[in-house]
Image (cartoon, grey):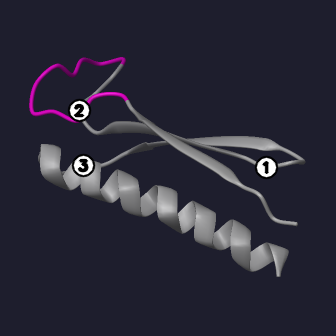
Amino acid sequence: MFRPSLSKNTGIAGPTGGNEEKPVGLVFIGFADESKVKSIKIILPGDRFLIRWRASQAALDLLRRKMLKSF
């Protein structure tokens, strides 16, 4: 049975607070299921609203891709 667990952690959504190590738009998306744990790091453009929206869409897309592989 497919039982995913999906979480998203945002580094810096902006509009301020970024630096060279953690720029505005830095997002980590993590995924875990019974067999593995995977995380990806992405840097998204846009203002705070767009970064948060794009991060949520990226997390949902990762879940969608995982579900398509399991069926």
Give, as a three-letter code, the residue at label 3. Answer: Ile
Residue 67 screen position, x and y as percent: 71, 72
Q: Quadrant of residue 23?
A: top left
- Dot 2 surroundings within 10 Å: few (below 14), some, or many (20 or more)? many
Mark 1 to mark 3: distance in Å?
26 Å
The dot on residue 51 is 3
Give, as a three-letter code, the residue at label 1. Answer: Asp
**Residue matched to label 2:** 24
Task: Please report contact status of discs 3 and 2: CB closer than 8 Å, yes or no.
Answer: yes
**The N terminus sits in image quarter:** bottom right
Tell me: 31 left or right of 33. left
- Dot 1 surroundings within 10 Å: few (below 14), some, or many (20 or more)? few
Residue 5 screen position, x and y as percent: 67, 48
Magenta residues span 11-21
Callout 3: SS:
helix
Give, as a three-letter code, the residue at label 2. Answer: Val
Residue 18 screen position, x and y as percent: 21, 22
Q: Is residue 45 visible?
A: no
Tell us which disc is closer to us: 1 or 3.
1
Q: Earlier in the sequence, mark 1 or mark 3?
A: 1
Q: Residue at x 11, y 47 (%)?
A: 47
Mark 3 to mark 2: distance in Å?
9 Å
Q: Is residue 69 above or below residue 54?
A: below
Specify whether residue 18 is painted magenta: yes
Residue 9 screen position, x and y as percent: 44, 34
Q: Residue at x 16, y 19 (%)?
A: 17
4 or 56, which lies in front? 4
**Residue matched to label 1:** 33
Callout 2: SS:
loop
Mark 1 to mark 2: distance in Å?
29 Å
